[in-house]
Image: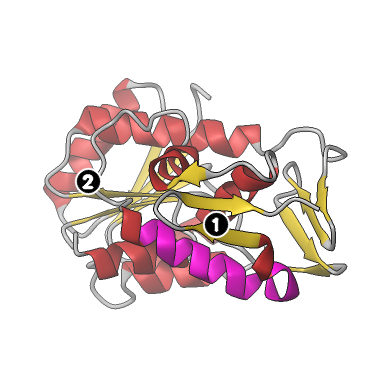
Amino acid sequence: MSQASVLVVDDEQDILELVAYNLTKEAFAVTTVTTGEDALRAVRSQLPDIVILDLMLPGVDGLEVCRILKGDERTRGIPIVMLTAKGGEADIVAGLELGAADYVTKPFSPRVLTARVRAVLRRDKAGDGDESASITVRNLVIHPGKHQVLVEGRPAELTATEFRILVFLARRPGWVFTRQQIVDAAQGEDSFLPDRFVTDRSVDVHIVSLRRKLASCGSYIETVRGVGYRLKEE
């Protein structure tokens, strides 16, 4: 991971220099651009391992860049960390729903941002495990290594966060998990870091979205009032 490539997209030159300096110091290979259009060109020219993306960009904004990258088969697997001054819950949930792996608000600590980048890359690498280790719950089949979910044999398109939540619940069917436990699972190894993008309400939003995307299998996810959620056993 020491030579992982990072594309940083921000229209503020001082932010670009700060992020690039700190990531380069940690042995990342860093490329910087200032517009959404340049970001799309850079990604298509040479796929980075991860993208740090500002939302408030001139022309094509960050949400649109994220939407385009996640809608392209060639680029949808690239994890995106959103870095922005737009810290409202609606903005955060919108970014996560589009498939962002993490969300850091300005002002930020460069050390925290670097740790978040490393955590996202570790989670992404961990997803490349044994493709045969599938999880089957009645008509629902989950392939953690392939990052694939089949509902009655048909693929379901989930965001990275939704997928981690589903795998977490499916590994222990019948067990009830609190929202905080689900938050920790969705965040990964560095859940101890200061965080402002995952709230109880955003967990509920992800669960609602999961149920909808799982269609006939959506009812497998049960709400346990006053506690949290579980995936029903057989």
Q: Main secondary structure of the magenta part?
A: helix
Q: Which residues are magenta?
A: 202-217
Return the mark for residue 162.
Answer: 1
Which of the 4 image quadrants contains residue 115?
Answer: top left
Residue 45 x %, y % = 55, 57
Q: Please say whether residue 213 is one of the residues in the magenta stretch.
A: yes
Tell me the kind of residue under disc 2. Answer: Leu
Q: Residue furthest front?
A: 225
Q: Residue at x 26, y 41 (%)?
A: 195
In the picture of the structure, the residue carrying the numbered disc 2 is 16
Residue 108 x %, y % = 16, 41
Name the secondary structure under disc 2: helix
Q: Residue at x 53, y 25 (%)?
A: 1
Q: CA distance from mark 1 to mark 2?
A: 30 Å
Q: Earlier in the sequence, mark 1 or mark 2?
A: 2
Q: Please say whether residue 14 is one of the residues in the magenta stretch.
A: no
Residue 67 x %, y % = 48, 71
On screen, residue 86 above or below 83: below
> Relative to 15, is 181 on the left or the right?
right
**Number of other residues with Cα within 10 Å of mark 1, as a class: few under 14, some 14 to 19, many 20 or more:** many
On screen, residue 25 above or below 177: above
Name the secondary structure under disc 1: helix
**Number of other residues with Cα within 10 Å of mark 2, as a class: few under 14, some 14 to 19, many 20 or more:** some
Depth check: 117 or 211 in front? Answer: 211
> Relative to 200, is 58 on the left or the right?
left
